[in-house]
Amino acid sequence: MKKMGIALIALCLMMTAVLGVASVSAAEVMYGDVNGDGKVNNKDLAALQQYLADWDVEMDMDAADVTHDGKVNNKDLALMQQYLADWDVTLEPDEPDIPDDDNIYNDTELVWP
């Protein structure tokens, strides 16, 4: 019985740890802040360039994926360069289209075969 209680406590602790990590939301990620200093600047761009050149650098992979495609690659680098050059781009993910009562299909044209 004692072993079962210890196993149950261990299981609860593991689940708490897993759920705690899984509960990090996209709102908590500062996209573009690759080095985690709270700013998006040329230091982040340099770290991303080094990573893409196969250097051994520590960086926040979620923050580096500014194109939100699940990969960190040259597309992310290009978007960060545009952002830092004050182009009209954003590093945050797009808001999903949510249908309202008047426009249930969000202006999507239905095409019948």
Image (cartoon, rainbow, N blue to C red):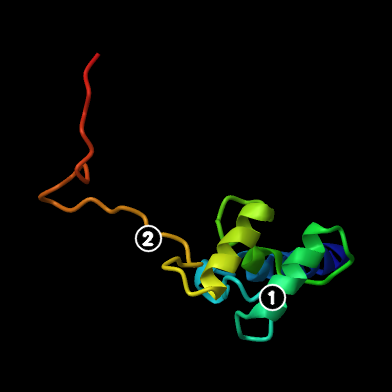
Residue occupying image coordinates x 68% and y 70%: 16
Residue occupying image coordinates x 22% and y 23%: 111
Q: Measured along the vertical axis of the image, is residue 14 above or below residue 96?
A: below
Of 22 and 74, nearer the camera is: 74
Q: Measured along the vertical axis of the image, is residue 32 above or below residue 36?
A: above
Residue under label 2, please give it.
95
Give the side of residue 104 with respect to residue 85, left or right: left
Give the side of residue 107 with respect to residue 68, left or right: left
Residue occupying image coordinates x 20% and y 33%: 109
Residue occupying image coordinates x 23% and y 50%: 99
Q: Position of residue 56 (x, y in %)?
A: 89, 66
Give the distance between the C-alpha atoms of the residues marked 1 and 2, in whole angstroms: 24 Å
Of 25 and 96, nearer the camera is: 96
What's the residue type where badge 2 is placed? Glu
Give the side of residue 34 with respect to residue 88, left or right: right
Q: Residue furthest top?
A: 113
Q: Position of residue 2 (x, y in %)?
A: 86, 68
Marks counted in the figure total 2
Give the side of residue 81 with respect to residue 54, left or right: left
Q: Position of residue 36 (x, y in %)?
A: 69, 80
Q: Quadrant of residue 65?
A: bottom right
Q: Is residue 63 visible?
A: yes
Q: Is residue 19 visible?
A: no
What's the residue type where badge 1 is placed? Asp
Of 8 and 72, nearer the camera is: 72
Does dot 2 land on a helix, a strand or a loop?
Answer: loop
Residue under label 1, please give it.
44
Does dot 1 land on a helix, a strand or a loop?
Answer: helix
Q: Quadrant of the C terminus?
A: top left
